[in-house]
């Protein structure tokens, strides 16, 4: 090959199984053998489950809070048990699945150094906060994450290019926006940052397929595809509730039965988490600068009251 551009063309045409650009670290396009999922909340736990079950990789769940680690571990075991009862997994498959998932403390520097050096692919699924995400990347890099490892983020709205600006290898950073609940929803929205390279994109798409997920690709714009469309829809439903156009039940019934969607916008918001919806609307409003993305005041009120939806047993509906 005469040049780096020749190499990239050959890679895209499937002529190279791996690629090493001059002056960069060598990396493989083979599926990862070990994945770290950072953040063991609802999304992170679901991602870990799907990676271990379908991609067949070793998975380590990392979180800074022991309670989150315990909940995640218990949920994974409970999920596998339910799958076995439904005849979708054998006892041997359940045992193999549980062996593949381990959990560890993100704040344990010694443990993190051991794990980080072994990881081929990281999927970060912490809260939707730029500084929190970047602090996780700093910790992983300080612990010795290999330069060849891909650093993916499950962000639903924050710019991949902005997140990548603080990492040592921005070309190895990419967005993997999973849908909730992860074991059930078939889509991953893949977002390429300005500096994400072709090999990182291709490996990420391969991993999506290995995890038995369909994928779509989006440019790195505020909200990407899914939330650029979905969140204003939910926000407008909150405005309709706030303005007394209809009750929560009537708004949801109208949209569910009138447009043939599985649940209405306010129920969906409760399932997503009202704090997440508000965070995304604020990103859209700030980064696009259009007043049509202004968060509904009632949404702000609910979040300030701690009514975040199903996870707190109170949102637009009462789940107690």
Image: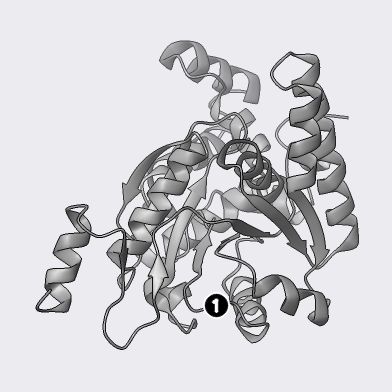
x 51%, y 70%: residue: 149
Q: Which residue is mark 1?
A: 146
Q: Quadrant of residue 105?
A: bottom right
Is residue 141 visible in the rendered image? The answer is yes
Question: Would you say residue 125 is visible in this rendering?
Answer: no
x, y percentage for residue 122? 58, 63
- The percent coordinates of residue 254 (x first, y second) are 50, 16
Q: Is residue 26 above or below residue 246?
A: below
Tell me residue 297's x, y (percent). 59, 51
- 98 and 72: which one is in front? 98
Q: Where is 34 relative to 250, above or below?
A: below
The image quadrant that residue 196 belongs to is bottom left
Q: Which residue is at a point 39% across and 76% down the rendered structure image?
A: 26
At a point 12% along the width and 70% down the height, the residue shown is 6
In the displayed structure image, the side of residue 9 where residue 167 appears, left or right: right
Height in image: 109 above or below 261? Answer: below
Question: Tell me, what colour scheme is on the image?
Answer: one colour
Q: Using the image, determine if residue 273 lies above or below residue 27.
A: above
Which residue is situated farthest in the top direction here?
257
Q: Horizontal and vertical percent for residue 220?
A: 34, 61
User: Is 300 on the left or on the right of 192, as rendered?
Assistant: right
Left or right of 134? Residue 310 is right
The answer to which image quadrant residue 29 occupies is bottom left
Q: Nearer the viewer, residue 152 or 285?
A: 152
In which quadrant will I find the C terminus? top right
Which residue occupies 66% across, 61% down? Answer: 126
Residues 313 and 243: in front is 313
């Amino acid at each position: 090959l005469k040049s780096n551009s020749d190499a990239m063309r050959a890679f895209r045409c499937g002529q190279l199984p791996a690629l090493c650009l001059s002056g960069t670290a060598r990396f493989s396009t083979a599926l990862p053998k070990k994945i770290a999922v950072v953040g063991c909340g609802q999304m992170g736990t679901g991602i870990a489950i799907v990676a271990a079950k379908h991609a067949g990789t070793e998975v380590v769940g990392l979180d800074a809070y022991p309670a989150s680690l315990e909940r995640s571990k218990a949920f994974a075991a409970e999920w596998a048990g339910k799958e076995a009862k439904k005849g979708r997994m054998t006892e041997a498959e359940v045992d193999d699945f549980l062996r593949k998932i381990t959990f560890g403390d993100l704040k344990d520097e010694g443990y993190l150094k051991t794990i980080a050096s072994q990881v081929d692919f990281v999927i970060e699924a912490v809260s939707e906060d730029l500084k929190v995400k970047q602090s996780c990347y700093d910790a992983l890099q300080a612990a010795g994450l290999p330069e060849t490892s891909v650093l993916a983020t499950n962000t639903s709205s924050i710019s991949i290019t902005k997140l990548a600006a603080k990492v040592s290898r921005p070309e190895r950073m990419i967005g993997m926006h999973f849908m909730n609940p992860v074991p059930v929803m078939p889509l991953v929205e893949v977002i390429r940052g300005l500096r994400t390279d072709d090999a990182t994109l291709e490996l990420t798409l391969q991993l999506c397929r290995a995890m038995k997920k369909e994928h779509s690709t989006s440019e790195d714009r505020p909200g990407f595809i899914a939330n650029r469309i979905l969140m204003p829809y939910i926000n407008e439903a909150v405005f309709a509730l706030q303005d007394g156009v209809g009750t929560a039940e009537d708004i949801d019934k109208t949209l569910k039965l009138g447009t043939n969607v599985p649940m209405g916008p306010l129920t969906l918001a409760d399932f997503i988490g009202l704090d997440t919806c508000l965070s995304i609307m604020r990103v859209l409003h700030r980064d696009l600068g259009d007043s049509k993305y202004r968060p509904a005041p009632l949404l702000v009120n609910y979040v300030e009251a701690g009514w975040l939806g199903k996870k707190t047993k109170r949102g637009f509906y009462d789940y107690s």
